[in-house]
Image (cartoon, rainbow, N blue to C red):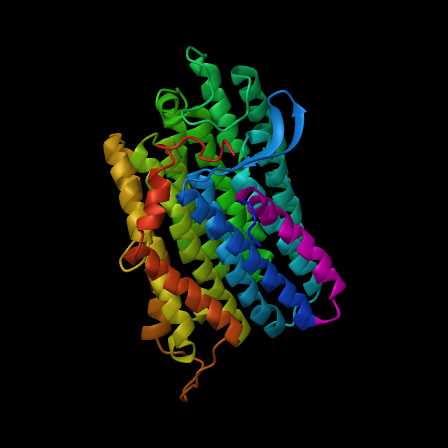
Amino acid sequence: MNLSLATLLQLCILLPIFATLGIVALRRHQNLREAVSVGTSVLVFYAVVSIYLGLQGGATIDVNWLQILPGLSLSFSVEPLGMIFSLIASFLWFVTIVYAIGYMRGHNEDHQTRFYCCFAIAIGSVMGVAFADNLFTLFIFYEILTLSTYPLVTHAGTEAAKKGGRVYLGILLTTSIGFFLFAILGTWVMAGTLDFTQGGVFPAGANTAVLGFILVLFIFGIGKAAIMPFHRWLPAAMVAPTPVSALLHAVAVVKAGVFTVMKVCVLIFGIDLLSVLPTTQSLLYLAGATVLLASVIAMRQDNLKARLAYSTVGQLGYITIGALLASSMGVVGGSMHIAMHAFGKITLFFCAGAILVAVHKSKVSQLDGLGRRMPITMTAFFIASLGIIGIPPAGGTWSKWYLLMGTMDTQQWIILVILLISSLLNIAYLLPISMRAFLFKDPTSNAAVGIKEAPLPCLIAIGITTVGCIALFIYPQPLYELASSILQTSSIAHGQ
């Protein structure tokens, strides 16, 4: 049965929601319940790939669910940036479900049915964010994503989990309602539309001081981008099970944030206007400060997941910098980094979870000699670390290269220096972990220790994402083509 691309787009959003019914119905049958999650993730990825291939053939998509007011609708379309986000999120959902099966069973987690239900709703909302045709639609699914991930953050039910959940929900809702919503209203007043439009929506001659203030509201209001000082929700959310940290805080939630920043900068303001706004430079320096400060804080964290969390705060700053550089190279580099960081960081989180499941260690200081017991996991950790640092043979090399090119194109020499220093800091907080694992001896063991890896599903997922890190270095062309077409193609989704 051949489904239209418009139908496939809607299925990407609705299938995960419908899957929750099957997950609940089969809650007493563990294998069948998890088969529903795996099967749905495969179908969603298939639908996204079919959309991608259809668009490559010149097809267009335009879906309107609800007309609320003239010019204000709940509608969806596809453009290159959304295509990047949806491909990455849908593929990594499948991989994370495979990983979660091994982790949740190996760790004997409670409330697994609730976990898989909330996970599915979160992915459906991510698809809604990726394919949103306007700011109104994006905001609706952005908030659904926040609410659906709260039970995942507080999954353990401990006081620490509840406290982390309060910080998570408090910051994300406060920034959304206090800043993001007002930025959207300001855009409606100044432009008369919320539709994503190539070149931006604001009319010529609009007051740049007012537009600069609206930009500030957007950057602070999109709390999921974790720009300081609104970043504490991300480290707080590390109380969640590792599969949640891996996908939602390495891919879905945080990437929804920087994806929204990129989309606002390119398709609401437009890079020509962005380059002349009075607040752009200050926000660019703020993003640079976030990169440096988060990297320094990461170096001081002994808890492995906390170190990775602060690393994510810094890496998200790279993408925000790419958007605020207001140059084609910056947009290409920032957009590519969405994918490069996703594969690198999800691998690191997978490895952290595997270590916890296999040997019950969570601190960097406890990892001496672990490479002998967990060679597969720690080799993957090393390769993923290279991706985050931006060293061959991992894909992060290319995204950081284009970001550096963007700073040179715009003569942002201070930002260039910040990016170079931060890469050195990446080395300082990531490579010592691998060095401890492979070059140091475990002080608690004098005898030869056998190999003790995490359950097979965890290793399969780690293997897939590690190969992805390398594949993005060897064959980055499809990703580059999508990223470079963001500024060249008006919404390729209109007209069907």
Residue occupying image coordinates x 41% and y 89%:
447
Q: Quadrant of residue 20?
A: bottom right
Q: Nearer the viewer, residue 267 or 349?
A: 267
Q: Give the x, y percent position of residue 485.
A: 35, 37
The part of the image, by quadrant, that contains residue 441 is bottom left
Residue farthest along the bottom direction in this orientation: 447
The location of residue 265, given as percent across then percent down, is 43, 30
Q: Is residue 97 above or below residue 7?
A: below
Q: Is 20 one of the magenta-colored residues?
A: yes
Question: Can you say whether 288 is above or below 315 in the image?
Answer: above
Q: Position of residue 423 (x, y in %)?
A: 31, 49
Mark count: 0
The stretch of residues the image draws in magenta is 5-29
Residue at image point 27% right, 31% down: 412
For the stretch drawn in magenta, the main secondary structure is helix
Is residue 205 shown left or right of residue 241?
Answer: left
Q: Quadrant of the N terminus?
A: bottom right
Farthest front residue?
1
Q: Is residue 23 left or right of residue 262?
A: right
Expressed as whole percent of the image width and height from the top left, the position of residue 63 reads 58, 36
Q: Is residue 311 above or below residue 100?
A: above
Horizontally, residue 387 falls left or right of residue 108, namely left
Determine if residue 82 is in view: yes
**Residue 411 on the magenta segment:** no
Q: Is residue 226 visible?
A: no
Residues 337 and 20: in front is 20
Q: Residue at left 33%, top 52%?
A: 396
